[in-house]
Amino acid sequence: MNHNERQALLLKYQEGKCTKEEILKIHLWYEGLNADGLAVLSDQEKGEMEERMLGKLAAETSPVEYAGPVVAQSLWRRSAVYLSAAAAVLLVVSFWVFFGDRRGKQGVMQEKMFVQAPDGRLITEENTTNAPKRLTLSDRSTVTLEPGAKIVFPASFAGDKRTVQLTGNAFFEITRNPDQPFLVYSGKIITRVLGTSFRIKSNAKDKALEVEVVTGKVSVFENREAFSESDSTGSQDNGVVLTPNQRVTYFSESRHLMTGLVPEPVKASTATAETKMNFDDEKLAKIAATLQETYGIEIVFANDRLAHCSFTGDLTDMQLYDKLALICKSNGADYEVKGTRILINGHGCD
């Protein structure tokens, strides 16, 4: 039985148009199946089992045709008890036959497509390796896909904007073009930039998306087209603007955007390499101003007396949070991240 004959038989059975002989073939086939094992089979095993079942169906056609009316009638009565179970198995098998290949071809990008190409040429790149994969787009922007990530983009950008669609985690370095902003569609949010570097992460466990900015300025907002009319926010805009070392976490269920700082802030691109980080009895007011200029993060004191405290030490090769911890410890103070700012708490100094 070839592929087309198999499809025709399954369709006839589902539509109730099989003859008694055809139904008998199906039930005899089912007698030899281990229905309990279907749920635990891999895709490869399912394919192999399907071929075995089809072979069994073809092999068992001849005995029925020549068994005579008495044997056929006996087999018909015996196979009737399998009718309900066979129908369930046939639904599973027919699903593999008609939809298995299509699912594999569509992949993870079954979500609504927001990227368009004037010439109809869309490129899909997926990182199926265990290492980051770097791509260069037509505008010389680069995208580094983390393992398992996928991106769809036009072969060449045209019009008044550059758009791509991302699934998974990636780092972007975007060529600046004020006349053609760059938009990344990911889940239910859009990240819009002119020219900057940033990172997008997805967290399946919390159903959240994160955008972290390394350089430049980024706006992140909800994609209204990703929602149904009943979920629409109306005229309300739900978005934020981020600067270097800031990040936003978007929770899709609550549709809440929470801003904060990245786990390990880096020096801003405007900071000079010669920025002095070796302090000798320096007031915290000046140290805070230096750190703020270097990292682009606002640092505030809980009270004015803290600004009069001093610190001596070399902080040159330390991470920002380690620097703050050492400064605060030497003055009986502590710090905490409040949104996109750092607050230093303590009694202060006279």
Image: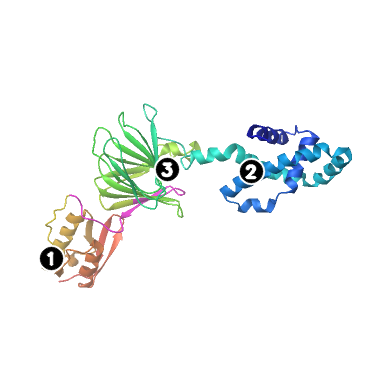
Amino acid type for the residue under numbered disc 2? Glu
Q: Position of residue 260 (x, y in %)?
A: 32, 54
Q: Which is nearer the N-term, disc 3 or disc 2?
A: 2
Q: Which mark is residue 51?
A: 2
Asked if residue 249 is among those painted magenta in the image, a careful observer would answer: yes
Amino acid type for the residue under numbered disc 1? Asn
Which mark's residue is nearer the viewer, 1 or 2? 2
Instruction: Tell me where the magenta segment starts and ends, as one range.
Output: 248-269
**Label 3 neighbour load within 10 Å: few <14, some 14-19, many 20+:** some
Residue under the image location 57 percent in, 48 percent down: 44
Question: At numbered mark 3, what does the secondary structure look like: helix, strand or loop?
Answer: loop
Structural distance between the alpha carbons of marks 1 and 2: 73 Å
Question: At numbered mark 2, what does the secondary structure look like: helix, strand or loop?
Answer: helix
Q: Position of residue 144 (x, y in %)?
A: 32, 47
Structural distance between the alpha carbons of marks 1 and 3: 45 Å
Can you identify the residue that label 1 sits on?
278
Q: Quadrant of the C terminus?
A: bottom left
Q: Position of residue 278 (x, y in %)?
A: 12, 65
Q: Which mark is residue 236?
A: none
Q: Which is nearer the N-term, disc 1 or disc 2?
A: 2
Residue under the image location 58 percent in, 38 percent down: 99
Question: At numbered mark 1, what does the secondary structure look like: helix, strand or loop?
Answer: strand
**Marks 1 and 2 close (CB-CB < 8 Å):** no
Amino acid type for the residue under numbered disc 3? Lys
Count of numbered marks = 3
Which mark's residue is nearer the viewer, 3 or 2? 2
Asked if residue 293 is among those painted magenta in the image, a careful observer would answer: no
Residue under the image location 53 percent in, 40 percent down: 103
Vertical position of residue 247 compared to residue 112: above or below: below
Task: Depth check: give the residue in front, 87 or 163.
Answer: 87
